[in-house]
Structure formats: C-alpha cells, structure tokens
Amino acid sequence: MIESPRQFVLFVDNVYRLIDMTTLNETIQINRPAREVFQYVADFATCVEWDSTAIETARLDDQPVGVGTRYKVVCEAPFGNLPLEYEIVEFEPDHKVVLVGRGRFFEVQDTILVTPTDTGCELDYTAEFTWKPMLKRFAASIEPGLKRMGYASVQKGLKAALDDEYEAPEISGENARADRFVPTALMRFTKRGYKRGAKKLFNPMSRYMGDKHVVLTGATAGLGKASAEFLAYRGAKLTLVVRSREKGQALVKELKARTGNKNIALEIADLSLMADVDKVVASLTKKGDPIDVLINNAGALFNPREVTSEGLEQSFALLLLSPYRLTEALKPLLKKAADANGEARVINVVSGGMYSQKLRVWDLQSEQDDKYSGSVAYARCKRALMIKTEQWAEDWADDDIVVNAMHPGWADTPGVESSLPEFHKLTRLVLRSAEEGADTINWMAVASEAGQISGKLFLDREPRTTHLTSSTRESDESREELREILDNWDNTEASDKAA
C-alpha cells in the first residue's frame, strides 16, 4: 500500500523503469578453464555460432579484441532482420567483457562474467535492454519472448558450444543425393551451396587454440590468408610458409596488429623447389616445436608447361611432390604433438577440379599429352594428393595423426581470377568469398569433432564422395604404384636432369 508521497514517487519510478528496461540473466557451469571460455565468448564475432537469433556477424575494425572493438550483428526478429552495432566498453582478460549494442528499437548492454570454479568455471550472462520511445508501450508484452530467447541462447546454444561434445560428421542425406549427379553436385560448389550448409549443418567451434601450433603453406593470399587471419584471431601459434619474404613480412605485421596475436613466425620457401622444402623441414626440425596442425594449401595453376630449376614439371612439383615431401618429413613433429595432446592433424587442400580427372600414374609430370593444359595438370595432381591423403590416414592411424582433404568449392580468389579468367568471368556471380572457401579448412583445424574422422574429403564441413563418375576411379594397382613412386622418389634424378 502507498502511504506517502515518497512511496508514490518510488512506485511510479519503478513502473517506468519496468517499461523502460528489460533485464535478462542466465548462468551456466562449464567444465573448462576460464581462459578458454573467455577467449571464445569475448570475441563477439562467435555469437553467430550460439545466439538463437544471430544470423550474421562481422568485425567493423582492424584491432585486437578489447575496449573499442566493434561488431555488426544481424538478428532475426518477428518484423524482419535487425542490424545491431556492438562495441566493447569494458574488458578484463579471462574474467569480464561488457558490450553495448545499438539498434533501431533498443540499446542493450551485455555483461559476461567468467569465474573459475573447482571443476572449471561459471559463466554469468546479463543483457539489459533499454527501449526506444516507440517500443516502451510494448516492452511488457515483448519481455516473455526475450526471456525465452535468452534462455535458448545461453542455456542451450552457448552451453552446447562450450561443452563441445559434437559427434563425428557424416554426409547428410540431401548432399549424398546431390553427389549422385554431376549438375547437382556442382551446385553445392557455389556461394548458395555454402549458405545452405552454413544454415543447416554448422556447429560452433570453441576448441582452444592458444596451445596449438599450426603450420600453414601459401598464406599470403586467397584461402591461405583467410585461414591465417582466422587462426590468428583464435590465438594459435602460427608458422606461415610463404614464397615472398616481402609479402610474408607484411602479412605478419598486419595479422599481429589486427588480432593481437604476437606468436606468428615466417618460413620463406618456393615450395616448387624440393631444396626449399628441405630447408623448411630442417628449420622446423631444429626448432623442435610439435606441430598440431599442418595445412598444405600452397598452390598455383601454370600455363604453359614449364619445369623448375630442378627439372620437375611445376604442377607436379608444387601440388604433389612438395606436400608429400613436407608432410612425410614433418611426421616426427606431428607425432610429437599427437603424443602430447592425443592427436595431430594434416589438412590437404585439393580442388573440385579433380572430379574431372583420373589418376595417370604413368604421366605424373604431364609429358605425354599432345597439348599441355594447366588446369588438367592441376586437377590430376589434386586427384593424386587425395589418394595420398587416404593412404596416410590408413598408414598413420596408430600414430593418432588425422589426415583429411578438403576442397573449397568455387571461391573468388586472386589465383582463380588470374589463372582461369574465362571461368571467373562466367561464374563470378555465384563464387564464394575467400573466407567462405576457407571455412572448412578452419573447421578442420579447430573443431573437436573434425579430429574424430580420417581419410575423408570434406566440403562445407561434411565428408563427400571422392568421385562423381565411375570413369575417374583408379585401380588398386595404380594407387599402390603412386605410393611406390612417391616413397622412392630420389630428387637427385631431377637435379641431374636440370644439370
């Protein structure tokens, strides 16, 4: 009962505040160290993975995560998509982050507190919505829906993301049916194919990478650069193998400034030269750091046919012999990581173009065709690398080294534009971005469930068929002959040819 003017004023003020502001609060217990949980949630770009309404996120500046970092978040709403601009206003590493989001209808302050416990940590999430005048009258009716959204986002979405107990991936029935026919399979290579997969299939990736060493080849452009940036934001220790010292140094400087990750090193090598491959191996072996993830991404399409200074056809040298030689030689460091952490991973970047070609083990250097085609040579080498991926997975299973391949679909990269100008012109409206093309590389490097399966080809985070038609299937004899040729390759033969 109101018995005084002061009580009446307080009552009116409380009613006004109830209408003016809505507060949501959820608390979850996580069986993981606080620093791992904080690193994931503090970068608000990850909210699209767990927030029940977020459908798109993007960073709006080039700076490490901290006070002043801004994000664009697009949320689904009953009246259409709602864009919000968030900014971090408080930041205490491993403990607290406060963000303010502003949109057309409200302002929201999100406070995330991470507190260590005996079994891991506790995460407390509070969101305070301040309504614009046009929505104040509807605040009471909106509140129940907001509370359901908050519960779904934190208790279900974020809790599941941080528990990180996803099962090994399997091909969906829809994609299995699509792979039965070349036209429908090719449609999955497009930007629309990526969007379809992202909407239906993608799990969050909260695995901590701050204690993981990733070696990535071909990092200065396209898919490699997109992956380097993603992994740098996730805190991985990076060794980038690049051909151009100038471009490599510029990239390292850029990544350190943008992500705050100072643990990025360079190895300079032209990977079409086996002598340079051997130098990289010697350098990494001398350092002795275990390699948790090796990403064989370096590639190029060459026209006309040329040989290297070592006497090797360029496609064969760069796309097949180089990743073979590098991976085999770095196995001890991969095994070292597997012994310490339970697994290591090798990711071979191949190409959808391999679906058009069959292994020609008698002509790995494209010497017997009347007319050389760079795209055909490229596809044949990628076909051979896919076969080698399957062999490594089988041979190294007892060593806990997971070996898989991926192809990025049709991605709009500088290499595609320069080497396949007609294809680029014809398909430019349906090409994926480099970031979309690199997404499966990133997932294979980071996601916990990606370490549960080996010897597969992935597209959009799903294992896919390695052959779209029976005409490209190789015999068991050809597969074994490929193994023998590579296992017994003596580079002195190439050097003698060059001399």
Image (cartoon, rainbow, N blue to C red):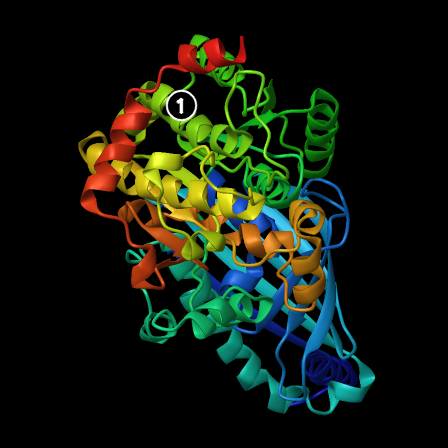
Classify residue 412 by image quadrant.
bottom right
- The image shows residue 392, relative to residue 8, as above or below, that is above
- Judged from this view, the residue extending furthest toward the front is 370
Specify whether 438 is left or right of 21: left
Is residue 342 visible from the viewing direction of this image? no
**Residue under the image location 54 percent in, 84 percent down:** 145
492 or 145, nearer to the observer: 492
Q: Position of residue 8 (x, y in %)?
A: 74, 86
Q: Position of residue 102 (x, y in %)?
A: 76, 68
Q: Position of residue 395 (x, y in %)?
A: 21, 33
- The image shows residue 333, relative to residue 456, as above or below, that is above
Specify whether 122 is left or right of 66: left
Q: Position of residue 450 (x, y in %)?
A: 35, 49
* Element type where label 1 sits in the image: helix
Q: Amino acid at mark 1?
A: Arg
- The image shows residue 7, relative to residue 328, as above or below, that is below
Specify whether 117 is left or right of 12: left
17 or 230, nearer to the observer: 230
Which residue is labeled 1 in the image?
325
198 or 406, nearer to the observer: 406
**Residue under the image location 39 percent in, 28 percent down:** 324
Specify whether 423 is left or right of 319: right
**Residue under the image location 69 percent in, 58 percent down:** 422
The N terminus: image quadrant: bottom right
- Judged from this view, the residue extending furthest toward the right is 133
**Residue under the image location 57 percent in, 63 percent down:** 126
The mark tally for this picture is 1
Q: Residues within 10 Å of mark 1 (few under 14, many from 20)?
A: some
Is residue 258 visible from the viewing direction of this image? yes
- The image shows residue 464, relative to residue 222, as above or below, that is below
